Image: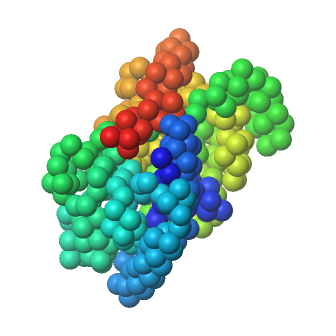
Amino acid sequence: MRIAFYAPMKSPDHPTPSGDRRMARALMAALDLGGHQVDLASQFRSYDATGNRENQERLRDMGSRLGASLAQKLLHTPDAEKPDAWFTYHLYHKAPDWIGPQVCEALSIPYFVAEASFAPKQAGGPWEIGHDAVAATLAVADGVFTLNPSDAECILPLLKSAGCHHSLLPFLDPSPFDQAVKLRSSHRNQISGKFNIPGAPPWLLTVAMMREGDKFASYRVLADALEGVREVPWQLVIVGHGPADSETRALFAALDKRVSFLGDIESEDLPAIYAACDLYVWPAVNEAYGMAILEAQAAGLPVIAADVGGVGSIVAHGDTGLLAATPTPSLLADALASILKDPPLHREFRRAAMERVREHHTIARAAKALSDVIKG
């Protein structure tokens, strides 16, 4: 099948790295692996960060015009070049899809969505336009894949039938991580030399953008948690950059030389970073699930995080890491200390993390799950 792919939150070819971009690219790759031809339908970004109604109206009108124009163009395209289905990734009130439903109606093709969320509390709020648009879009969807189990409860009542809903575990291609793990010592030596990171203490890793809101809140909790394990040897490695860079760095000022900031790292270079480290730690404030958490486990890193959103669907508490009930500094510090002080437990978690990803979270598994639904 020929599939038109669209990500209203952030296009897969957007220049700024993020978990959204990585998952959009992963979905395109999974569809391709399933034997489909995947075409990026539009780069239009409908995202409104501030809840500005005037801006949302502008984005709605622009998206609607683009949708109408694309529909007309495709109607006059040879049949062999027309899409057989539309696939939208990450649909929610801040980033509705103004294009896909128009095209699907004009061409009479099915409409699929992955990672949609719907928040009834947003009704009548600052993002009312996007909120209502998501409800209308989900009502006509032929298939909705949820990567975060907690999204299902609010989505199901909006669908044509319960049969339109499908669970899809977050996934990745494990092969780059397999290769990186084999070269772990070499990667660690190179990274240690390049960034002047002490090689002896266990390396804790965090990979996250630096921006206001939930990301900054997680960094704040992380800094506080690390204050509670000062007596244990460790070195924190942070990969990430963003508009709150200076404010984020300031949170770790008291920890001084025990924190190394690597800045932005290209996606293809991340497996080496993961493999070189020993433990992944992230408070996960309001996290959907966290692609970095999954990538860390693929490289054999046990995870310390809070059990929020869909994090518990990719981290097995007591098997591949430890999950705190809430993103509380003291709880995360206790979990971190328990692994750092127990090398045999750490080794067992490393093995289990890699095994879990390869059993449940591979791109091959996702490709089959997607194709089974799309092909009907």
Residue 75 drawn at (x, y percent): 45, 70
Q: Which colouring convention does the figure follow?
A: rainbow
Q: Tell me which residue sits at (50%, 14%) in the image.
A: 348
* Residue nearest the observer in this picture, 137 or 46: 137
**Side (left or right) of 100 relative to 230:** left
Rendering quarter of residue 40: bottom right
Q: Tell me which residue sits at (77%, 30%) in the image.
A: 187
Residue 27 drawn at (x, y percent): 50, 46
Q: Tell me which residue sits at (29%, 52%) in the image.
A: 142
Residue 330 higher or lower than 139, as above or below: above
* Residue nearest the observer in this picture, 149 or 375: 375
* Residue nearest the observer in this picture, 366 or 77: 77
Residue 261 drawn at (x, y percent): 69, 49
**Side (left or right) of 293 relative to 243:** left
Rendering quarter of residue 17: bottom right
Residue 332 appearing in the image: no
Q: Tell me which residue sits at (48%, 47%) in the image.
A: 1
Please state, as top left, top right, bottom left or bottom right, where the C terminus lies in the image. top left
Q: What is the tally of numbered marks visible in this picture?
A: 0
Residue 318 drawn at (x, y percent): 38, 21
Q: Residue furthest top?
A: 344
Residue 299 appearing in the image: yes
Residue 281 higher or lower than 71, as above or below: above
Residue 345 higher or lower than 29, as above or below: above
